[in-house]
Amino acid sequence: SQSSSKPSLRPSSSSIPSHVPTEVPVCEKPEDIFFYRMHLNGNPTMQKCDWLAKKTKFKRKEFCANNVDYAEVRGVILGPAQTVCKDSCKSCDPCYENEKSKFVLYRKEQVIKKTCKIVSSMSQTAREQVC
């Protein structure tokens, strides 16, 4: 039996309540997990959204803005908090942008990671090719 404090890669089996109070998050579930960081030994660390929600507003803002990497864990791609814990990170708005977010370009069999800030500085033609 797993401890309830450890993140699990199993999908949630919770049902949607018939009445949803206004204070309930709409873009995240407390048990959803995100990629937290990579240990020096190369093993990824995961956390749950409820862990992040308990942090101070300042810590959440700082964490969500700076931790933008994805990781693969046992064949599952884990996203950063800003894409998983959207209520805690205030990233639920479909127009949310983080200039530190990363995207991948594939050029001549090379994988190139760039930040979204770079895209805004590109010409219209270059942006259209990337996007």
Image: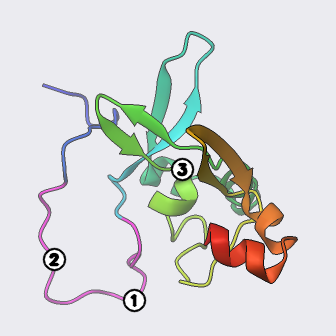
Q: Quadrant of residue 81?
A: bottom right
Q: Height in image: 116 above or below 77? A: below
Q: Quadrant of residue 119?
A: bottom right
For the record, the magenta segment spans 12-28
Q: In which quarter of the image is the N terminus?
A: top left
Tell me how far mark 1 sits from mark 3, CA to CA: 25 Å
* Of residues 68 and 55, the one drawn nearer to the viewer in this rendering: 68
Residue drawn at 82 percent across, 62 percent down: 118
* Of residues 125 and 103, the one drawn nearer to the viewer in this rendering: 125
The dot on residue 115 is: none
Amino acid carrying label 3: it is Pro
Q: Main secondary structure of the magenta part?
A: loop
Amino acid carrying label 1: it is Thr
Give the image location of residue 130, x and y in percent. 65, 67
Q: Could you tell me which secondary element the residue under label 1 belongs to?
A: loop
Q: Height in image: 6 above or below 88? A: above
Q: Quadrant of residue 89?
A: bottom right
Q: Could you tell me which secondary element the residue under label 2 belongs to?
A: loop
Q: Height in image: 85 above or below 129? A: above
Q: What residue occupies the far right of the structure in this picture? A: 121
Q: How many labels does the image show?
A: 3
Q: Residues within 10 Å of mark 3 (few under 14, many from 20)?
A: many
Question: Mark 1 or 3 closer to N-term?
Answer: 1
Tell me how far mark 2 sits from mark 1, CA to CA: 14 Å
Q: Mark 3 points at which residue?
A: 80
Q: Name the residue under label 1.
A: 22
The dot on residue 16 is: 2
